[in-house]
Amino acid sequence: MGVEETVLFLSIKPRFAASILDGTKTVELRRVSPAVQEGYLVLLYASSPQRELVGTCKVVDLEVGSIDAIWDRHGDRSGVTQAEYGEYFDGAKRAVAIILKEPLRLPEPRSLRDLRDALAGFRPPHSFRYLDRATVDDLGLVG
């Protein structure tokens, strides 16, 4: 599916979701690279204890590189300390940086219960999953 048809649903710790939405975190770090490119819509789901869909943003770019190279290029915009970064990537062979733009807080967060009512059997992913844009639009998950 292309940029217009696919939505990336990111599960993210509440502190990082808040930082993305306030514009202080513009790079999301991952150990596994999602198949996204510039323009992809991202749904931000704040994981436990919050468990709510809280906002959206868009992908600017995705970079995969060595642990050191990604820290050098993006560490200051990642929302983590170098110690946290090192702990997260301990044992990994590479790091993934998803560069984000246009954060938008939802006027009313959508609870996990609301998401399950809208999508029968919905389970938030541990890291990320893809949703069909038509499904997202039909269900009114974002404006």
Image (tube, helix red, strand yellow):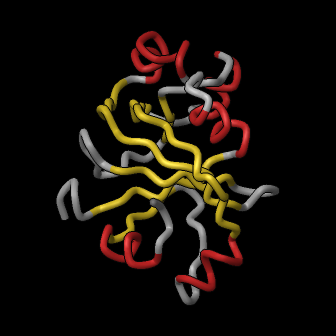
- Please provide percent x and percent y for residue 41: 36, 51
Label count reads 0
* Above or below, comparing residue 140 to residue 143 in the picture: below
Q: Residue furthest right?
A: 49
Q: Residue furthest left?
A: 2
Which of the 4 image quadrants contains residue 96? Answer: top left
**Where does the N terminus fall, quadrant-wise?**
bottom left
141 left or right, relative to 130: right
Residue 94 visible: no
**Residue sitting at x 50%, y 35%:** 28
- Please provide percent x and percent y for residue 99: 39, 30
**Residue sitting at x 48%, y 54%:** 43
Residue 136 visible: yes
Nearer-the-camera pick, 97 or 55: 55
Nearer-the-camera pick, 58 or 34: 58
24 left or right, relative to 48: left
**Where does the C terminus fall, quadrant-wise?**
bottom left
Which of the 4 image quadrants contains residue 58? Answer: top left
Q: Residue furthest bottom?
A: 120
**Residue sitting at x 24%, y 39%:** 38
- Please provide percent x and percent y for residue 5: 23, 64
- Please provide percent x and percent y for residue 70: 42, 20
**Residue sitting at x 64%, y 31%:** 19
Nearer-the-camera pick, 28 or 41: 41
* Above or below, comparing residue 72 to residue 10 in the picture: above
Which of the 4 image quadrants contains residue 120? Answer: bottom right
Nearer-the-camera pick, 107 or 67: 107
* Above or below, comparing residue 110 to residue 42 in the picture: below
